[in-house]
Each structure stands twice: as C-alpha cells, then as structure tokens.
Amino acid sequence: MVRQNLCMGIVAGLDSSSAFTHIVVCDTDTGAVLRQGYAAHPVEAKATEVDPQAWLLSLGEAATGGLLEGVQAIGVSAQQHGLVPLDHQGNLVRPALLGNDKRAQAAAADLIDGLGGRQAWAEAVGAVPQAAQPVSKLRWLARTEPEQAQRVAAVMQPHDWLVWQLLGRPARRTTDRGAASGTGYWSAGAESYRPELVELALGHQAALPEVLGPSEAAGTTPEGLLISAGTGETMAAAFGLGVGVGDAVVSLGASGSVMAVHHEALADPTGMITSFADATGMHLPVVHTSNAVRALRGTAEMLDVEGLDALSALALKSTSGSSGLVLLPYLEGERTPQLPHTAGTLCGLRRESMKPEHLARAAFEGMLCSLADALDVLRGRGVEVRRVFLLGAAAELPAVRQLAPALLGTQVVVPQPAQYAALGAARQAAWALGVSQGALDGRTPPAWQGAAAQVLEPGEELPVGQAVRQQYVATRDQIHPGAFDPAR
C-alpha cells in the first residue's frame, strides 16, 4: 500500500518566470503554504534575450531571510521555450533566447519545408514549428549567427539550466518530459528525442539533457538537498491546480489558450493543437487563440470606458445575444481558426443594437465563443472535457463569470489567485522526496488539497448560451467559410 505520510517534511517550489522568481515553501503532507519569497528579475520584462545569471540573482534574492531553512527538497518551474546554448565546457555561447523572441518566424517556416511539411512535423514530434520553440531558435542562430552556432555543443532550457546550477553543474544534465515536449525535437508520442531535427536546425549535433520521469530526482546537492526533475511553467501550473482527465484549463491573457489532460499525444498537421507532455505521465494538448483580453481592451477603448471592470458592468446591462451583435474577435489575425492575416468583424448592426452596452457584451461573448471553438478542437479529437478551470485576471470579471458556463457549455471552476506554477514545482519535489524515502511510489503523486475555487454551473442559462454560440458559429462560417473544422 502507498503511504501518504511524508514525516512532516517541508519542500520548496520555485517558479522562475519571464519577470520574477516566486518561491513557496510547503508542508509535504498537505501542500499548505508555510512561507513565500519573491524577487523581480534584474532585467526588463520585455527583453527577448538575457544572461541566465539574472535568474540566479533573482533566486538568491527571493530566498533570503532563511526562507529555505529546513527544506528537504526543491522543485523548479521556469518559463518555457527559452534556449540556453552552451559550448563544450558548459559555458554560455551567447545570451539565452527567451520564449517571447519572435525573430525565428522565417526559421520556423524553413524547418517546416525542410522536413517535408506540417504533416511530417506533426508525426515526428506532435507539433508544427513555431517561432518561439527552441528548434526554430536553433535554425535562426545557424542562419544569423553562424560563428556562434558552430560553438554550440549542448542546449538547455531555463528550468534545465537552473536545476543544473543548483546541483553544482554536474556532468549529467537533465530535463523532464514536459519541458522537452516543447522543444520541437522531442516526440511526446514516442517519448524520445529526434536528434536529427537538432541537426536539421543547427547544422550539427548537440548534446541534449537526459529526460527524467515525473517522480525522479535530478540529483542531490552537496548539502543533501534533493532537487526534483523540474518542469515548464504550463505543466507545473496544471500540476499545482490538480487538474486531471476530464479537466481543461482556459487561460485569459491578451491571447488565449485551452489545454486539457489526455491519455495520449495528438498529432495535428493543421498546427492548431500542440502536444505537450505533463508533469504526471499524461499529456497536455494545447490550442491557442490569438485574441482574448485584447478584444476586451480594444472594445473598452472604442467605447471610451475606463478599464475592464467598467466594461463588464456595461456588458451586463445588455441581454444574451447582444441585441443581435456578433463580434468575431480576430483583431491580430487568428490561430484558431487559422486566419493569420484576417481582421475582426462586427455583424448584426441595426438601429436598436447600436448601443454601448450591446457592443460591450458582444466583446465578452465573442471572446468566450472563440475559446469555445478552441475547446471544440480538442473535443473533436476525442479529448474529454467535463469542467473548465478559468485562469487569468479577466476570470474575476462578473461578465466573464456570468457568461462563461453557458457559452463554454460546461461547469466552470475559477480558482483563487495563487502561484500555481510554484505550487506544482513544490508538489513535484514532495513526490520525488516521498519516492526517495519509500513513502510514495513513482505512479502516485502526493494527494495535496486542491485549489480553493468558485464553481459555476451552466444551469438554466445553458440553452440561451448555446443559442448565442450558434449565432456566433453561423456568423463565423458565413464570413470565413470552411476555415474552421474541429475534426480535421
């Protein structure tokens, strides 16, 4: 029998995002947060490349004041899609390229053609190259900085590099399946590297970190502190939330994303689905939209409304269907459906609908219907979705909470704001610690208490919401016929 008592130990999870380091120290048995630390990175948040030493400086500042005293294990979560290129001695070849660096767009297109198209990439690694991915950054480096590229002997991502540093830069370098699945040269389906894709991108082979299982430890520091495998922010946040099969997570940022827990990787030649691996041994297929909260902000500016709270209040003065107004919120082009060069569309204008409150509500309905499209892409590939976790500051808006269950067609869970990536890293550390102590097995993570949340049901509003959704779909298909087929 698996025992869940980990001897009242404490573990830490650190999340090194693009702008800050956040550390949570947790009880191993319950996951209760005992103390926290925070520090901003000493770099501009919008920087596209940085000396990784900045991450260590931020980590050190966040851990001051005895924060890690008594900690037995640490898990590391970090920003995804960064590329840390190293030479034969393990020294930095050039500053790390971050995930927000979009200079590799042409390089990604070159790689797609170089392997024989989208289908070939989907079959090889479960994803079609995007500018952010390390494989595209390697091609960009080979094309624009060939002398630097020739010196690259090994490549890592931010969480890999931080774990390696915490362990004292051992000969063995490690990563986990979650972070590896975002590189563009590790197959989530086969659970193995495709080193020939590194050579295709860089022009020569490079050493890749060993991929650890979810409960494995990367090593132990000279002081006896266990360091778990670590993972990317997306995977750590999902683990911290405690999502499982049947759950989807909808993130409301300027753009949007929908991910769900699934038992297998999904190969999608259209590029709408990116197959990530998660931090538990399962998979996280993700669908992105280019427009989410940016559509709300644009509408607020158009209506000269001060902030999203005021826009939400205005929207709730309207009624379902926004008096016939339908907003297709494709303001920056769109990824789902794939319409990179299109613009947004406002339909259904009549004299009675030309009121601020109707446009405000149409913005919320359009944003949520677009995310429902993304959910349909996953459902169309057999992914089960019984409830949706709604994340992001916009999830707190009354209009979002009132409209989301009916428009998304399922139960909606709005977790209380928390550092879920850091919590997921801490939970992983507790898992690895428990395995090392014989208190847990490698298949069963510690049963921490789930996130505190508000649960919203579609209820009697479901038929009305689905009518609004049908109105949106009819408009979308009329303006962009054939662009959206969730079962492709």
Image (cartoon, helix red, strand yellow):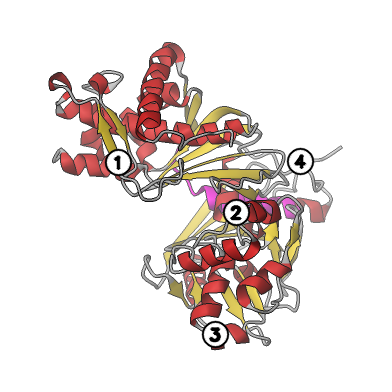
Q: Name the residue under label 2.
A: 118
Tag of residue 468: none
Q: Which of marks 1 and 3 is nearer the N terminus?
A: 3
Q: Name the residue under label 1.
A: 344
Quarter of the picture containing the N terminus is: top right
Q: Name the residue under label 3.
A: 146
x then y, percent, for residue 381: 63, 34
* Element on which disc 2 rests: helix
Q: Mark 4 points at which residue?
A: 4
Q: How far apart are marks 1 and 3 (CA)?
A: 40 Å
Residue at position x 13%, y 41% from top?
Answer: 304
Q: What residue type is labelled 2?
A: Arg
Q: Earlier in the sequence, mark 1 or mark 4?
A: 4
Mark 1 or mark 4: which is in front?
Answer: 1
* Element on which disc 1 rests: loop
Magenta highlight: main SS? helix
Q: How far apart are marks 4 and 2 (CA)?
A: 45 Å
15 up-or-down from 455: above or below: below
Image side of residue 445 versus residue 24, left or right:
right
Proximity of marks 1 and 4: CB atoms separated by less than 8 Å: no
* Quarter holding residue 3: top right
Residue at position x 70%, y 71% from top?
Answer: 208
487 up-or-down from 339: above or below: above
Name the foreground residue: 36 vs 245: 245
